Image: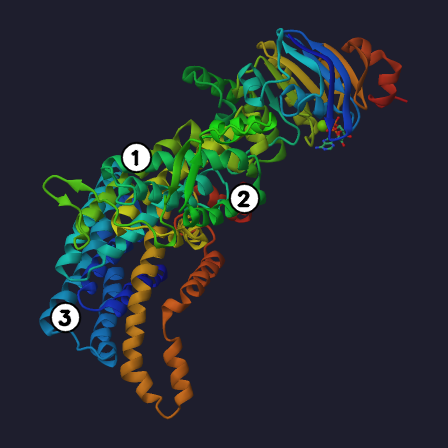
């Protein structure tokens, strides 16, 4: 019972925090999402034999408490916080339906999801799948109808989900610490930029380019991996760090590429000089002064995907982009699952656990690690191509070290080695970065201008200090680091860990559990 | 079947094997005894391709092994239960055994070998879903041998299978080795426990600071005064 109240309060407040920032119709969307999430969380400790009806009824109390907390926060936001931030509270004709649907939706979806746990395994899985599909498909439309406009930013989060999935192969499955993953993201994006923009007057079709980007990223994974993967552990981390640092610099400086044919330019003149001949030979230049990447100002505009009936994907309509990235994620998850469960996946895990033992089993460690590196890189090629087309331009600064680190955090926070965990981690971290912080910034600014700063007019220095520092975007990395520290202290295995990593981190507890079992 | 000719192995400039020559014939149990640091584990690692000999040849039925990478050697039919067991600690017993069969593709054969392992080590079957790292020392040793069996090797290299085990378990493990041998696996056994090793082996080699100083049938070695004095603890 206590656990249920705790869950209800956590979930109610969690949803509340988001509603607190966004107001308006967000209460409806969040209510439903939190409901599903709560239903899933309850699933961990139910008795399957109770059957769907009983489980649904049981969940009602939890859902009810959560919904009350949630609605309370929502109303507080609307009638206290919004006016304090200088906004008018939403009209009743929005407040009533939004909160009503949000609260009831939370209860309904909690019960519905909880009930699924009472079904036989196969039906339970099918039910959850259908629920997920419906939510994922409905999201962008609800987002548009309610005027929340989250889709555009969610798409960014989903790009990082693909990056996380790719890096998870390297870090989570094969246990190779890679600090330079953004390098492959950059290669995917620049391949797309170079092959479909006015930069070189090449306008290849996006549906073709995305595969070329994938292949290029994988190829560079092989090229960079071959010399480095003989190293172990810490050394590998340092080398990947170096590669990651180099990549933006290289793209910044590939503005003046000249390739000369060596035979005619150096070898023959060299021989001539040996014989003191002054006969001039003609040097054949293959590429002369080519501006490959346009340096700091980047490549744009980059070509976009085109589909019959939909036409070219546009900036002002996120829906086609949303479904495209969802499709890419589904494809990635499908492929990565197949890899994980196959022979290669087992070799990755064995190398992660104990490379020397893996060698004794007949595993070729270099080949195994190289495939992890190259396949991991390949998925960032997907992400890079999509990214380049979505924002229409690419700039070297996007692919700095911080991007590598964010992707690494997505993998670690989500749960190393666990695909669902990485997806959730990507959405949470990038959602926080792209949606949460800007909203927090607006909220704070409103509060500052209308309530706090006027109250501080007596002390001008304090007023100035507060006004300058009340921007959470400034603290982006601070907050990010803080989250990591807290998370690692409380739940080092990530949000949804893989069974093996959990065993690794809680080895002592497990042993004691075994000991207990033996004693009994 | 397996033949080492003048094998020299180094760790940096430490000369660990100084021209070791030996043979193992099909169907035999051959043991290598020697004191700590004699180079016994080094010899097994060299055969298995984990270390490269600087000089000398290792032949498996006439084919040179010393240039092949480890995984190719496993494919040729040599598997090892290594010193220190090297269990995958976070994998279950079942997953550990599956890793042993990594190079194989014959599903039916693998299933058969699971039965084979479980028949010799019923204890492993009871603990099939337990994590390798949480097994007792003796159980881990069984798992290490079972895992080597899963490769269905022609020659199995066993590095001190009795290490850290109670006398009863040592007896059981040695019985198991004899049983394995009867079922057709050739065995190269490295042991500190020379008495036990010589009691089951057909022939034995004595390794001392990287050199073979003696080899003979087990029966004769047991009678040898030097062996008795240094390795069998007689006075
Ligand atoms: N990785 C290594 N680096 C340097 N020297 C090593 C290494 N491994 C072993 N040696 C040395 O090589 C020699 C032979 O070692 P080895 O492990 O083969 O002995 P052993 O006969 O198996 O001994 P034990 O019975 O104690 O297991 C020893 O002197 C040891 O110190
Ligand atoms: Mg040894």
Under circle 3, the secondary element is: helix
Q: Which residue is mark 3?
A: A95
Q: CA distance from mark 2 to mark 1?
A: 28 Å
Under circle 1, the secondary element is: helix
Residue A288, image x, y percentages = 39, 39
Chain hosting mark 1: A
Q: Earlier in the sequence, mark 2 or mark 3?
A: 3
Q: Which residue is mark 2?
A: A239
Q: CA distance from mark 2 to mark 3?
A: 55 Å
Name the quadrant containing residue B61. Answer: top right
Q: Earlier in the sequence, mark 3 or mark 1?
A: 3
- Left or right: residue A163 versus residue A277 is left
Badges 2 and 1: C-beta atoms under 8 Å apart? Answer: no
Q: Which residue is mark 1?
A: A211
Under circle 2, the secondary element is: helix
User: Which residue corresponds to the image point at 39% horizontal and 80% vertical from the top-left?
Assistant: A466
Q: Tell me which colouring the rendered structure shows.
A: rainbow
User: Front-most of A57 and A436?
Assistant: A436
Chain hosting mark 2: A
Chain hosting mark 3: A
Residue A514, image x, y percentages = 53, 42
């Amino acid at each position: 019972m206590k656990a249920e109240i705790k869950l209800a309060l956590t979930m109610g407040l969690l949803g509340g925090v988001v509603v607190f920032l966004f107001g308006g119709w967000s209460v409806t969307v969040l209510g439903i999402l939190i409901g599903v999430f709560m239903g899933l969380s309850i699933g961990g400790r139910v008795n399957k034999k109770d059957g769907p009806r009983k489980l649904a009824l049981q969940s009602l109390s939890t859902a009810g408490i959560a919904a009350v907390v949630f609605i309370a926060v929502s109303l507080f936001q609307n009638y206290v916080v919004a006016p304090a931030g200088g906004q008018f509270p939403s009209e009743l004709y929005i407040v009533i339906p939004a909160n009503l649907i949000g609260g009831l939706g939370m209860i309904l979806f909690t019960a519905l999801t909880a009930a699924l746990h009472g079904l036989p395994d196969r039906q339970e899985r099918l039910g959850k799948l259908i629920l997920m599909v419906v939510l994922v498909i409905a999201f962008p439309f609800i987002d548009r109808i309610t005027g929340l406009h989250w889709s555009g930013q969610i798409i960014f989060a989903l790009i990082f989900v693909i990056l996380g999935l790719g890096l998870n192969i390297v870090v989570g499955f094969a246990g190779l610490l890679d600090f330079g993953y953004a390098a492959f993201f950059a290669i995917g994006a620049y391949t797309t930029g170079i092959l479909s923009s006015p930069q070189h007057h090449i306008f290849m079709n996006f549906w073709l380019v995305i595969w070329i980007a994938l292949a290029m990223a994988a190829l560079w994974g092989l090229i960079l991996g071959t010399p480095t993967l003989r190293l172990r552990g810490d050394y590998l981390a340092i080398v990947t760090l170096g590669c990651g640092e180099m990549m933006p610099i290289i793209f910044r400086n590939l503005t003046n590429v000249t390739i000369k044919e060596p035979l005619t330019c150096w070898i023959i003149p060299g021989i001539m000089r040996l014989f003191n001949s002054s006969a001039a030979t003609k040097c054949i230049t293959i590429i002369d002064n080519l501006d490959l990447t346009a340096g700091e100002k980047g490549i744009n505009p980059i070509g976009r995907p085109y589909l019959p009936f939909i036409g070219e994907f546009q900036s002002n309509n996120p829906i086609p982009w949303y479904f495209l990235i969802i499709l890419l994620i589904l494809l990635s998850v499908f492929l990565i699952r197949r890899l994980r469960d196959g022979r290669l996946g087992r070799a990755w895990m064995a190398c992660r656990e104990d490379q020397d033992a893996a060698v004794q089993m007949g595993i070729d460690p270099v080949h195994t690690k190289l495939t992890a590196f190259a396949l991991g890189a390949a998925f960032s090629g997907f992400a890079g191509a999509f990214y380049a087309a979505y924002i229409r331009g690419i700039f070297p600064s996007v692919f700095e070290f911080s991007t590598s680190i964010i992707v690494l955090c997505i993998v670690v926070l989500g749960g190393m080695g666990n695909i669902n965990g990485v997806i959730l981690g990507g959405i949470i971290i990038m959602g926080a970065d792209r949606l949460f912080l800007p909203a927090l910034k607006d909220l704070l600014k409103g509060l500052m201008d209308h309530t706090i700063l006027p109250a501080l007019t007596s002390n001008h220095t304090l007023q100035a200090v507060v006004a300058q520092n009340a921007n959470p975007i400034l603290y982006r990395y601070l907050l990010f680091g803080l989250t990591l520290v807290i998370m690692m202290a409380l739940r080092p295995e990530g949000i949804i860990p893989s069974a093996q990593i959990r065993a690794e981190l809680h080895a002592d507890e497990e042993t004691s559990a075994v000991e207990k079992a033996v004693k009994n | 079947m397996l033949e080492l000719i003048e094998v020299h192995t180094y760790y940096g400039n430490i000369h660990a094997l100084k021209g070791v020559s030996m043979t193992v014939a099909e169907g035999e149990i051959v043991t290598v005894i020697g004191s700590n640091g004699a180079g016994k584990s080094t010899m097994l690692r060299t055969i298995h391709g984990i270390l490269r000999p600087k000089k000398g040849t290792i032949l498996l039925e006439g084919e040179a092994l010393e240039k092949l990478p480890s995984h190719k050697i496993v494919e040729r039919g040599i598997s090892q239960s290594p010193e220190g067991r090297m269990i995958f600690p976070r994998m279950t017993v079942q997953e550990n055994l599956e890793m042993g069969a990594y190079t194989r593709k014959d599903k039916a054969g693998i299933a058969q070998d699971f039965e084979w392992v479980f028949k010799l080590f019923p204890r492993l079957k009871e603990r099939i879903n337990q994590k390798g790292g949480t097994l007792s020392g003796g159980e881990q040793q069984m798992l290490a041998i079972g895992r080597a069996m899963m490769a269905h090797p022609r020659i199995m290299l066993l590095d001190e299978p009795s290490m850290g085990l109670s006398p009863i378990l040592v007896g059981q493990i040695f019985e198991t080795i004899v049983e394995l041998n009867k079922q057709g696996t050739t065995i190269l056994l490295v042991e500190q426990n020379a008495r036990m090793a010589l009691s089951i082996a057909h022939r034995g080699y004595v390794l001392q600071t990287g050199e073979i100083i003696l080899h003979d049938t087990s029966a004769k070695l047991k009678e040898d005064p030097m062996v008795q004095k240094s390795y069998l603890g007689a006075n």
